[in-house]
Image: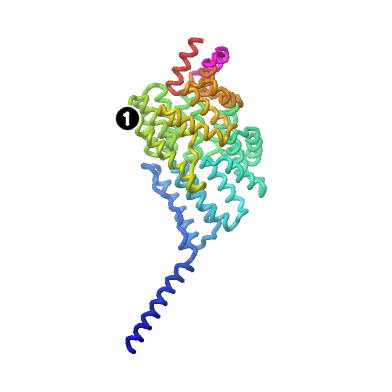
């Protein structure tokens, strides 16, 4: 009998223990069950003090959310922290996923939260899900219209989808609400797209003046101003902007990349490699890695170029393939992949990815330029022409596009147009890739 009592007692204890475990893990507080994404260390010694501040801010918001997962104010602050850190660190894939994960939690509680919808659109645009970003921004427009942020998203999304008139309308609305760094920089880009490089420079100067010196957004605008000076062939001013940026924000990768471009243009490849390697050590940005691979090749470091280019392709494919598992997690990188494959002389894969991007946004001028360039490299210049004509439809005066146009017109027997385009493209001796500059000059001399 005693044994039976002990058995019953043990069984009772067992069921009590099991019940405790079941109850503990089924009713445990919401904040404990949710995993919040942390701020990750930056690549290299990239402004440690700023990163510490960003981490403390993110940790503070996460603490509030653990206490109350429905604290919308803390969640929105965390999303903004993720987006800012993604821009600064170049670790876009991680932070876009973190931001999207958080913003979807907000929308689960508050489906019409205006700021959350705007942030969702911003993240989609960062992921190169441009059609989705445009639709999300339009859904926000039905809730509220007196928002410069909203119109900025509509500018960006319409530009990427090739809806340039709609982008201009959105830019007018944006600047009328808030004439600041964000609106001036978008006006600069639209002026550049429409062939007004000097007007673009004026607008980007206003953007720089409107920002706080040293902040990432201000120095991004200053780096873009440097690129506009590159198009004008004013390398003195371009170099000055990059050095001013580095003085204000030491170790800024975009400014280091700008100095690398100038050095490569001047055939100072050791200096170009030095600046690009510095930039690459401070950011995970794919564009910096692609440019470094090109500089390696120009410097005769073919092994380093091949290794880095393969790493770039692998990373972009991984990021893009994430769309298959979760559309919210992946980044479309097909335009960038097309150029990476061209660099590897793999024109079949270059064409595959150029057309994948074209099928998503057939009106975008940059996408059409990419397709035209790939067909040119494949010696299929007739097929390239319709893409080229779309790329030229906004009357862009970008030297690289004009030189490509001149080469294609020459290959198709229109020497008069070829001469006009090459002359315009080479005017003022703009900063161009060395091989394109030489090819364009050689072709122009024969016309």
Pinpoint residue 161: horizontal percent, then vertical percent. 59, 36
Rendered position, 72 above or below 340: below
Q: Quadrant of residue 435?
A: top left
Q: Residues within 10 Å of mark 1 (few under 14, many from 20)?
A: few
Q: Which colour scheme is used?
A: rainbow
Pinpoint residue 194: horizontal percent, then vertical percent. 60, 27
- Any part of residue 269 in sight: yes
The structure residue drawn at horizontal position 48% and vertical position 48%, both measured from the top left corner, is 325
Relative to the observer, which residue lies in front, 103 or 221?
Answer: 103
Q: How many labels does the image show?
A: 1
The residue singled out by tag 1 in the image is: 303
The structure residue drawn at horizontal position 52% and vertical position 56%, both measured from the top left corner, is 74
Q: In which quarter of the image is residue 386?
A: top right
Which quadrant: the N terminus? bottom left
Pinpoint residue 61: horizontal percent, then vertical percent. 48, 56
Rendered position, 377 above or below 152: above
From the viewer's perspective, tell me whether residue 151 is left or right of residue 222: right
- Any part of residue 431 in sight: no
From the viewer's perspective, tell me whether residue 389 is left or right of residue 278: right
Indicate whether residue 55 is drawn in magenta. Answer: no
Relative to the observer, which residue lies in front, 345 or 29?
Answer: 345
The structure residue drawn at horizontal position 53% and vertical position 18%, both measured from the top left corner, is 406
Relative to the observer, which residue lies in front, 55 or 140?
Answer: 140
Q: Which residue lies furthest to the bottom in this view?
A: 1
Pinpoint residue 340: horizontal percent, then vertical percent. 43, 31
Question: In terms of secondary structure, where does tag 1 sit?
Answer: helix
Q: Main secondary structure of the magenta part?
A: helix
Give, as a single range, the part of the protein colored magenta. Answer: 410-428
């Amino acid at each position: 009998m005693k044994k039976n009592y002990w058995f019953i007692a043990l069984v009772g204890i067992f069921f009590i223990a099991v019940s405790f475990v079941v109850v503990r893990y089924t009713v445990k507080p919401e904040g404990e069950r949710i995993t919040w994404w942390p701020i990750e260390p930056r690549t290299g010694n990239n402004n440690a003090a700023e990163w510490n501040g960003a981490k403390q801010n993110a940790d503070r918001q996460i603490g509030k959310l653990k206490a109350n997962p429905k604290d919308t104010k803390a969640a929105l602050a965390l999303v903004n922290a993720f987006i800012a850190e993604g821009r600064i660190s170049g670790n876009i894939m991680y932070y876009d996923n973190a931001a999207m994960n958080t913003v979807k939690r907000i929308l689960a509680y508050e489906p019409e939260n205006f700021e959350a919808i705007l942030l969702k659109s911003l993240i989609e645009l960062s992921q190169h899900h441009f059609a989705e970003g445009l639709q999300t921004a339009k859904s926000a427009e039905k809730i509220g219209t007196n928002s410069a942020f909203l119109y900025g998203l509509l500018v960006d999304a319409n530009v990427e989808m090739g809806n340039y008139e709609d982008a201009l309308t959105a830019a007018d609305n944006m600047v009328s609400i808030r004439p600041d760094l964000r609106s001036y920089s978008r006006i600069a880009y639209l002026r550049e797209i429409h062939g007004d490089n000097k007007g673009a420079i004026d607008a980007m100067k206003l953007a720089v003046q409107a920002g706080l010196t040293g902040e990432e957004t201000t120095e991004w605008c200053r780096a873009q101003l440097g690129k506009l000076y590159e198009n004008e062939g004013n390398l003195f001013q371009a170099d000055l902007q990059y050095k001013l940026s580095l003085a204000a924000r030491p170790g800024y990768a975009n400014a280091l990349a700008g100095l690398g471009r100038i050095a490569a243009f001047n055939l100072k490849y050791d200096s170009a490699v030095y600046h690009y390697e510095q930039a690459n050590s401070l950011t995970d940005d794919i564009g910096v890695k692609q440019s470094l691979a090109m500089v390696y090749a120009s410097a005769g470091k073919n092994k380093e170029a091949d290794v880095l280019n393969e790493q770039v392709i692998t990373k972009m494919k991984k990021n893009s393939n994430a769309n298959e598992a979760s559309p919210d997690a992946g980044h479309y990188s097909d335009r960038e992949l097309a150029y990476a494959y061209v660099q590897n002389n793999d024109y079949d894969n270059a064409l595959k990815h150029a057309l994948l991007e074209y099928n998503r946004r057939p009106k975008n001028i940059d996408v059409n330029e990419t397709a035209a360039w790939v067909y040119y490299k494949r010696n299929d210049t007739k097929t390239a022409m319709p893409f080229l004509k779309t790329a030229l439809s906004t009357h862009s005066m970008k030297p690289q596009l004009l030189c490509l146009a001149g080469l294609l017109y020459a290959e198709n027997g229109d020497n008069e147009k070829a001469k006009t385009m090459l002359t315009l493209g080479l005017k003022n001796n703009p900063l161009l890739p060395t091989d394109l500059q030489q090819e364009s000059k050689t072709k122009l001399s024969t016309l």
